Image (cartoon, rainbow, N blue to C red):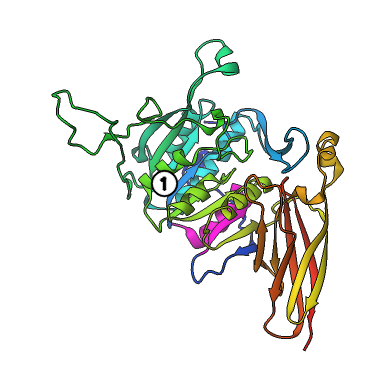
Amino acid sequence: MWKGKNRDRAGSRAPSTVLPVRTDEAHGEATGWSNRLVLGDVAHALPALAGALAGQVALVYIDPPFDTGGHFDFRATIPGARGEAPRVPVRAYSDARGLDAWLEWFHETAVLLRELLVEGGSLYVHLDAHVAHYAKVLLDEVFGPGAFQREIIWRIGWISGFKSRARGWIRNHDTLLFYAKGKRPKTFHKEYLPYPPGYMRRDGNPPLGKGYPIEDVWNAGGVDRLDSIQIMSFSGEKVGYPTQKNEALVARVVRASSGPGDLVLDCFVGSGTIAVVAEKLGRRWVACDEAPVAIHSTRRRLLALPAVRPFVVESVGDAPPAARRRLSVRSRVEGRRATLELASFGVSPREVPARVRAGVTHWSQWLEGWCVDWDHEGGALRVGSRSWRSRGEASLPLAATHAYRRPGSYVALVKAFDVLGGVAIREVRVEIPR
């Protein structure tokens, strides 16, 4: 029981106004399903999705705020900046609701997620000791006690440095609560860890089994290495998001509780790990977040994949837009070929410390990438050309060329994305002569 709880509403669908969903970007041409990256808070995004997806989601994995009372920043890196690579803090989210408000909010979220799950669909909720025990009781109420499958303990990794100075027992684990709608999971693929080289049974004979079956305590020994990337100084997965989770950790959940082509949902996508993992494993996915910088981080990771399937970027209702920037574009036409070149790009000085600005020698260093819709007719930007900075690269192509099939007057829509999560949009009139 929490302050403000309505007993008559327990287990029922949380009331919410259904807001329209707007498609802002279409990456790739889809003949059927397109994966979906949605900007919007859960109270509005989940009801908006339910109209088309109720009872269709095979797996939900969420890593929601833990009610820590803190604020978390995305740490953006400026490529090619002089001196030490500076990191600019960009607010990702605040986690200071207070327990009563958190329980009310999480209850409404759990009710909406239950509606989206297929019968037998799996739910994994990633938490820590701040609210894990409260969430367990609340999820028992929403899904029924028999829906609870397992409490998984994920050991974060080794202990060193500042963390080891804490008084008392050292915190070193997170909790994943595993539920199945309707009490029994529709899908579960048991996994095994390979035996180490030279492993023999107690009787001296080689093993006959598939390996060590994965238990409900993860990363507890040398056979099961699943350390958090947050303690790995040189992890290639890191994107600067404060609560980013390992691809290997999330992949274990996705492989176990879904199959190829199944629909996977995360409504707190953060850095984008669930979308990237689902993409790599051949699952359909829907990824939501209320923070523009989370959409930015997820888009960036997806577009860095060698062959990403078609996906759309959407926004729900009056979702907060990313910060707007100044962009100028030059154009030239030769026959039926048009070339657009970025001429300048500006970020507000108020967003960036002077020491960081001093290390930037060219305005293009602010850019993560840019896209062009060569024949924009209103609505979503349909990506025809795309230039994106590869990880670690200091340079970015600043010109794109397109061959039009027919003469006429066209509108080319240019959208540029910066490393801080902001965007700039510019329409350019292109005249193709006869």
Residue 159 in picture, x, y percent from top left? 51, 19
Return the residue at label 1: 254
User: Compared with residue 434, is residue 319 higher up or lower down, i.e. above or below?
Assistant: above
Q: Is residue 6 visible?
A: no
Does dot 1 land on a helix, a strand or a loop?
Answer: helix
Quarter of the image where one finds residue 387? bottom right
Identified at 74% across, 85% down, the residue is: 407
Left/right placement of residue 229 relative to residue 389 reads: left
Instruction: Let me know if residue 253 is in the magenta part.
Output: no
Q: Nearer the viewer, residue 315 or 336?
A: 336
Q: Nearer the viewer, residue 11 or 191?
A: 191
Q: How many marks?
A: 1
Left/right placement of residue 91 relative to residue 34 reads: right
Residue 432 in picture, x, y percent from top left? 77, 82
Instruction: Let me know if residue 54 is in the magenta part.
Output: yes
- Crowding at mark 1 (Cα within 10 Å: few <14, some 14-19, many 20+): many
Residue 191 in picture, x, y percent from top left? 31, 41
Identified at 70% across, 85% down, the residue is: 406
User: Compared with residue 336, is residue 280 higher up or lower down, i.e. above or below?
Assistant: above
User: Compared with residue 45, is residue 425 higher up or lower down, i.e. above or below?
Assistant: below
Q: Nearer the viewer, residue 194 or 141?
A: 194
Quarter of the image where one finds residue 5? top right
Q: Amino acid at mark 1?
A: Val
Left/right placement of residue 397 relative to residue 123 reads: right
User: Compared with residue 272, is residue 208 higher up or lower down, i.e. above or below?
Assistant: above
Left/right placement of residue 233 relative to residue 321 reads: left
Q: Which residues are magenta?
A: 34-55
